[in-house]
Image: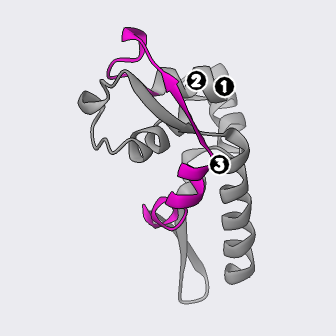
Amino acid sequence: MSNDIRTEAKIKGNELTDISNFRLKFILDKTIKIDSPTIELLIENYEFLKDSSVKIEVGSKYKQRPDYLSYDVYGTTNLWFIILYLNNCFRYEQFTMREVIVPTKDAILHVLRNYKSNTASNIS
């Protein structure tokens, strides 16, 4: 792995929108911290994210490519799974609609900031 990739991965990993911020943190034996993937964060915030969404028409450029749409809307491909979830898609192959809903970046950041502050206080 080149240094450029490592540097980019380290920078991206520190961004609030990194996918690892959508994981629950568990503590075992008061010493071991484990990240566990979760969908609960999206389930708990579904209505808020949906209410803060805008409808946009998407062309064939985004057919089966929510990661492209995520990049164009948010400036990162990290949030593709939120777009899929809010549009009731469970696989990339289902992402073929002409119109989709996309939550605002501010709404996503709000959810992540609340989650991070809540988990930080629970872990400490």
Per the rendering, the mark at residue 109 is none
> Is residue 67 rendered to the left or right of residue 6?
left
Find numbered disc 1 in the image and state the secondary structure of the residue it sits on: loop
Q: Mark 1 points at which residue?
A: 75
Would you identify the image quadrant in which residue 54 lies?
Answer: top right
Residue 78 position (above or below residue 50): above
Residue 52 position (above or below residue 39): above
Q: Choose between 94 and 116: the one closer to the eye.
A: 94
Q: Do the residues labelled 2 and 1 touch (CB within 8 Å)?
A: yes
* Residue 47 percent coordinates (x, y): 53, 60
Q: Which residue is drawn at 45% across and 67% down?
A: 40
Find numbered disc 3 in the image and state the secondary structure of the residue it sits on: helix
* Residue 88 percent coordinates (x, y): 33, 45
Amino acid found under the numbered disc labelled 2: Tyr
Q: Name the residue under label 2.
A: 71
Q: Quadrant location of the C terminus?
A: bottom right
Q: Give the range drawn in magenta.
A: 39-66
Would you identify the image quadrant in which residue 118 lies?
Answer: bottom right
Q: Residue at x 48, y 44 (%)?
A: 82
Q: Name the residue under label 3.
A: 108
Task: Give the distance between the C-alpha atoms of the residues marked 3 and 2, in whole angstroms.
Answer: 14 Å
Q: Residue at x 75, y 80 (%)?
A: 121
N-terminal of the pair, mark 1 or mark 3, is 1
* Residue 24 percent coordinates (x, y): 53, 68
Task: Give the distance between the C-alpha atoms of the residues marked 1 and 3, in whole angstroms.
Answer: 13 Å
Q: Are marks 3 and 2 in contact (CB under 8 Å)?
A: no
> Is residue 9 rendered to the left or right of residue 69?
right
The reply to whether the magenta stretch includes residue 119 is no
